[in-house]
Amino acid sequence: MWRLAGAITMAVVDEYGSGEMLRRLADPWWFQAFGCVLGFDWHSSGVTTVTCGAMKEAYRHFRNDLGLHVAGGKGATSRKTPGEIIAVADKEAIASGDQLVRASKLSAKVDSAAVQDGYDLYHHSFFFTPAGQWCVVQQGMSDTAKSARRYHWLGETVDDFVCEPHNAIDDLRDANEPLEDLSGQYLLNMVATEADANRKRSVDLVGWKPDKLMAQVRRFTDGPTLFAPEHHEVLPSDVNVDRLEKIVCDVHARNPGDFATLLGAPGVGPATVRALSLLAELIYDAPASHRDPADATKLPPVLKSRSWADYSYAHGGKDGTPHPVDRETYDRSIAVLTDAVRKARVGETDKSQALKRLATFDCSSSKG
């Protein structure tokens, strides 16, 4: 899979540039089709981790020839992303290394703490170019819904990390199925446009003297009505008040000037964000947003006319659907692409003709 992933990536980069490859990875429909062409199950949440894993393995083998850098991964590997970015930035003299690390950390913090939609983040892949362009593909899993949700970010479209920053959010489901019903959960969307006042007031709250703020927290966690039934009942067992006090003191000392800085502070996680949001709503009458962020997803129309499953016909799927992976066709696809890239990179004038071989190559048949 890494050989084909690398060949496709190099072909796209050679023909359209590294920035275009990032745009395609940030398009959930193209990404899903990409994973299907690589031979993974079209209907499985594993397409995210496997496709990103194939990209990282291709990067390990091809390095700079791939046309972009790949960092991060699943589980504990995701936490190594900042170090991987810095290592590449230092080696390749990429001036924007610190900004890239910030983008990686904030995108992960947004989808794990500012967006509380019931999906726990467990995968974070960061793709970037020597010019400082970047995109993020990360995924969360809902134990309740038994489904996954993928979050796509594209650096060139991010005007504000904490206000509608996603390029797209996609539930890994059949296109004809509705989004998961999250009405029974406490859904908090701190990056919604309509949550602007709540974000600002949350920052104001940590500007208070910590003892004054914690007095309000204890006031609303001591009585039977708590945070008022029309919002969400937050019991003392749901909020570790002592831990929250320590975090509040630490953040207060940092004097954050905006919500992005507050969110990026060490220790600030879902519980802290939720507590500040509820207090901001109660004290300042600054309403939070409970809109599912996937409702406003911006899905580019590139591949909407086709089903993801269609692309499994290129080489088959590892689960045997729609047919077992055809290794002969798979290997031939790799050979055709790598030959096109090789010829293009040695300066042959028939670059476009070499790349266009794929247009006449019937990937649905092993006979080609």
Image (cartoon, rainbow, N blue to C red):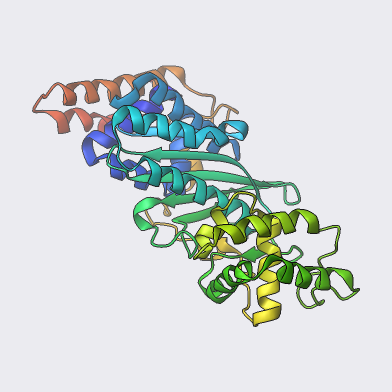
* 204 shown above or below 95: below
What percent of the width, then of the height, locates residue 53?
A: 50, 29
**Front one among 245 and 19:** 245
What percent of the width, then of the height, locates residue 116?
A: 65, 58
* 183 shown above or below 152: below
**Front one among 237 and 29:** 237
What percent of the width, then of the height, locates residue 243?
A: 76, 53
**Front one among 135 and 319:** 135
What percent of the width, then of the height, locates residue 180?
A: 67, 58
* 49 shown above or below 100: above
* 122 shown above or below 316: below
For image coordinates 53% across by 44% down, the residue present is: 138
Q: Residue furthest bottom?
A: 285
Compared across the picture, whether 52 is left or right of 364 comes to right
> Where's the C terminus, which quadrant?
top left
> Looking at the image, can residue 240 be seen?
no
Q: Residue furthest left?
A: 349
Compared across the picture, whether 85 is left or right of 272 comes to left
For image coordinates 57% across by 51% down, the residue present is: 109
> Looking at the image, can residue 123 be seen?
yes
For image coordinates 50% across by 65% down, the residue present is: 258
For image coordinates 42% across by 49% down, the residue present is: 27
Compared across the picture, whether 271 is left or right of 2 comes to right
Compared across the picture, whether 323 is left or right of 333 comes to right
Query: So how many labels did they put on this image?
Result: 0
**Front one among 90 and 63:** 90
